[in-house]
Image (spheres, rainbow, N blue to C red):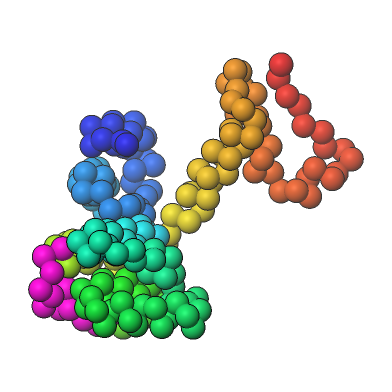
Amino acid sequence: MIGKELWTSIFRALPAEVQQAVREVCIDMKEGLLSVVQRRLPDALVVVDPFHIIQDANTRLDEARRLEQEMRRRPLKKLPFLLAKEKLSSSQRLYLQEIFRQIPTLKEFYMVKEWLRELYRLPTRAEAERLLSRILIACQASDDAEMVRWGRTLKRWRPFILNYFVSRTTNAFTEGTHTKIKLLKRVSYGFRNVQVYIQKMLLGFLPPILLTLPSWTPHFST
């Protein structure tokens, strides 16, 4: 995990003209990174990546499910809680209805998770603001301490969540790039030569059509 000092050094290494050209920054939910971005790029719009908001919601919901499972000493199926509401089968939907009747706290966590998913499908920032306000009220009114803490976290990140609706920026392409690089490295069983590693990564991101052109042949260092 990258610490605050390393993030500071990374931003400090950026040329002044690059820093001045940055208009928007999409980050995950790390307070240290946020403070560095705000200090080094004060004029940039900061957006918290939707994926990390939903990932955090699923993590909190699953932790609540696990704790209830341990306290009640009965298994609670994991998958139905993490599935999107529209993807639930009829049996999974009935299962959750019964669990929520017995354990209302889990219903609260599930509802907030689904409301956050709905938030990112809304067409305007004004609608998102209204829904997020409703989410925060629901969290604050909960009898569950973890739900209240979740609400405080969402409140701290509220402006950066809503900044998504300015241009709907996400880190999806960057995250996908990281995943593809890791996959290429894994299937290659590692690399001894850094140059070969770089070239293979570049080749992996070329449009497939280029590989079919007779006049284009890749060159690899040995």
Q: Is residue 156 above or below residue 118?
A: above
Q: Is residue 203 visible?
A: yes
Task: Tell me the quarter of the image containing the N terminus.
Answer: top left
Q: Residue at point 40% right, 60% down? A: 51
Q: Residue at point 17% right, 67% down? A: 147
Residue 76, picture quadrant: bottom left
- Main structural element of the magenta stretch: helix, strand or loop? helix
Q: Position of residue 192 (x, y in %)?
A: 59, 17
Q: Position of residue 104 (x, y in %)?
A: 22, 78
Residue 123, picture quadrant: bottom left
Q: Which residues are magenta?
A: 130-146
Q: Is residue 9 above or below residue 142?
A: above
Q: Is residue 219 left or right of residue 2?
A: right
Q: Is residue 119 visible?
A: no
Q: Is residue 125 left or right of residue 170?
A: left
Q: Position of residue 144 (x, y in %)?
A: 13, 69
Q: Is residue 183 left or right of residue 64?
A: right
Instruction: Work out whether residue 26 or residue 176 is closer to the camera in this orientation and state it.
Output: 176
How many numbered markers are drawn?
0
Residue 138 forms part of the magenta stretch: yes
Residue 116 forms part of the magenta stretch: no
Q: Residue at point 66% right, 40% down? A: 204
Q: Is residue 54 above or below residue 182?
A: below
Instruction: Work out whether residue 152 or residue 33 is closer to the camera in this orientation and state it.
Output: 152
